[in-house]
Structure formats: C-alpha cells, structure tokens
Image (tube, rainbow, N blue to C red):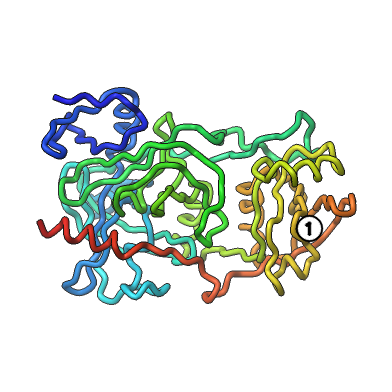
Amino acid sequence: MTSVQDPDLDWILQIEECKHVGGSRIKVQGPSKVVALKVSPSVVCLLSHTGKDKLFACSGTIVECGGKESDGTFVGIILTSASLLRCPSGAASLAPDIKVDVLLPDGKLLQGEVFAYDFHYNLSVIKIRSDTPFPTPSLRNLDESIPVTLQPALNSTSPRHSDSFKIRPGDKVKALGRHYHSHSLVIASGSFTIGLCEFDCQELMMSTCKMGSQIHIGGPLINCAGEVIGINFYHERYTPFLPINIAYRCLEHLKIQSVNRPWLGMELTNFYAVNLADMEKIVQKFPHISEGVVVEKVVKGSPAEVAGILPCDVIVSCGGHSVRCSSEFFGITWDKTRESVPVVVMRASCGNRQMLTIDVEDTSEHRYNRWPIPSTYLDMFWRSAEK
C-alpha cells in the first residue's frame, strides 16, 4: 500500500478508506482527510441532460435543508455553477428540455429541480427531495483585508465582520468535487493567492488549487477548518472562486427571482496587492492610508468615469462606510444597484481627497460576465465516461 502524506498533493479520496488509483492502492493520511470529511456529506455530483443528450457534469454543495414538508419529504438546496444549465453554444441562456441528475455521496441518484440560475455570476440553484434530511456544511464569509501600516484609513463605525474568516495569501485551502462515475470525493489542495484573474467577474478571488478536470466546477472551496468559503470555477493554471459572501447573497436573491448585478465600469485591486512603486507614491501623499481599493482601469462612458473616478485613485469610503478591501466594496455596492452612492477617494496625482458620487447601474445582458470552459476538458470528460 502506497501512503500519501504530503498535504499539497492532489488525490482522489474514497470516504470508506481507500481505492485503486493508477494500479496502486492509495491511502490518504493527515489533516486533509479530516477536513474533507467535515464537508463531504454535502458535496454532490450533478449531470445535466438536454433532451436525450448529456450536457454537463460538475459538483455542487447542499447549503440548506428545510424542515419536513407536508408530503413527508425534506428539501435540499444545492448551490452550483450555471454552466450545468447553459446552452451548448455557451450563450447566456437555459438549454432546452433540461433535466438534472444529482448523485449523492452514498451513490443514490435523485432527480434535481432547476429552481433558479444567474448567468452573470454563473450560479444555479437545484432542489432535491428525500425522506431523510440532508447534511449541510458550515459557511464562512471571507475577509481578505490586510493593513499596510498600523494606522487606520478612516474613522468609521461600520462593523468589521467579526464572524468572517480572515484569509491571507499563502493560507491553505482545498477545492472539493465529486466524481460522477465513482461518486468518490476529489480534492485539489493549494493556497489563497493574489494576482490577475483572467475572468470578467470582478468579485472572483483565486487559489493555487489546480484541477485536473471539470469535476471541481461548482464545488466548494474550504479553509483549514472545513468551512465553505467559496464556489469553484475552472481555469487551467489556478482555481477562480466566488467568495461565499457573494455566492450566498446571490442565493438569497435568486429565491425571490431578483439578483442585483451592479455595474460601475472599473477594475479594482486591494491596496496591499498593488506594485511597490505605485504603493510608495500613494503612501508619500497619504501616509495615513493603510487599506482601501485601488482603481486600476476605468471603462470609457461608464458610471465610474462619469463620476470622475480615475485610474490609481484609492477608494477608502463608499456609502458612508470605510472600505478596507474589494469584498467590502462589492458588498456595499451590491445593495445600491440603481442608486447614487457617495465615495471618497484619495488621489495621489494631486494629493487631494475627493468626494464623488457614483450612479450604480444594473448590468445589462450584453455586459454579463463570460465563463469560458475549454472544450478539450469537456471532451476528455465524456471520453472517460464512455470507457
């Protein structure tokens, strides 16, 4: 028996104990197994069909389970990727005659009900029913703020997310998924990282977890305590993920069929993540700044440009609340769609503090985020399925 003890390796974890992988019998040891077991009962695999044709397979998480219904069943709410439901052409529309199979950890197959979806944030909600209640994991909001100095950016009475998980670059995380054919749990280990994400969605964060296939798409990203902190998507070199802060807020809105999709027309990065030269210029003008979000790009004709926001501006306040990081900024603007919001920016080019007002527009369909998935990986999945 080969023993795998390096927690940074990727492996397939069979909950019962171990399985044959590539001719060798591999046993998973160490903290990864314990952490994964906290979440594994709620991680499912989903397979969609359009008519008689298989469409997409991915993973999902049962994030809620309601009380017993009048018919004696329990209703589970699965949060996953909307790629499960998207037209084969890739357009932001529902595939025709869609049906969804849901494979539970014990191998039981249930028929899923498409409850809601949003192609902008690439999330869908699938309902399932059972005679027994469904297990659900612990969810934890993310706080990725890192002060650059010991001095506060602005005095504020806004809450500091004391119930949030404080994440730092280098912190270990794991992307989970479930294999459709073996119903075994798949783990990709890595760490939280900062950098340029090539996807359109501004709210995405990144981990170094590297997926070998599409299995992890829609599955949970967990921290070292076994708490779900995000929903995974696919890239060849890293794992983009939507923080649970945004994903769960989408879920709450999808329940009432009304999702906020704020559009400002600018690209942002956290203050601590900008290059040293730009940071030094800002600190020379504003030595009291320790946190905030830096504007990297402003789209011509956008609400940001109309408001007078410029590249290299540091946004330190929005809607009367101090802004420490991008997730806080997005959280504030999420609830201000179709409203005018005051923002405070520090402009290093002139050394001034600017009081501006930005009109938060609703994202039109032609501006929806793109969510590309390489066709080679889809082909690889179905070729393996036919063996």
Q: Nearer the viewer, residue 130 or 181?
A: 181
x, y percent for residue 354:
86, 55
Q: Where, quadrant-wise, is the N terminus in this rendering?
A: top left
Towards the viewer: 74 or 144:
144
Is residue 75 at all visible to an observer of this figure?
Answer: no
Residue 83 location in percent, x, y? Answer: 36, 63
Q: Residue 206: x, y in percent?
A: 49, 46
Up the image or down, 164 lies above or below 216; here it is above
Direction front: furthest residue: 277
- Which residue in the protein does label 1 denote? 342
Image vertical order of residue 308 relative to residue 242, above or below: below
Front one among 381 and 318: 381
Give the residue type at disc 1.
Answer: Pro
Q: Is residue 340 visible?
A: yes
Q: Residue at x 89, y 49 (%)?
A: 351
Q: Is residue 162 above or below residue 276?
A: above
The residue located at (46%, 43%) in the rendering is 207
Q: How many numbered marks does the figure carry?
A: 1
> Considering only vertical position in the picture, is 121 above or below 141?
below
Using residue 180 as the reference point, say whether residue 39 is left or right of it: right
User: Label 1: how many residues lie within 10 Å, few (<14), some (14-19) or many (20+)?
Assistant: some
Quadrant containing the C terminus is bottom left
In front of the other: 164 or 144: 144
What residue appears at the point 68 percent right and 45 percent down from the top-left corner?
Answer: 275
- Dividing the picture into quadrants, the one containing residue 310 is bottom right
Q: Residue at x 17, y 42 (%)?
A: 106
* Secondary element type, mark 1: strand
Where on the picture, by quarter, is residue 271?
top right
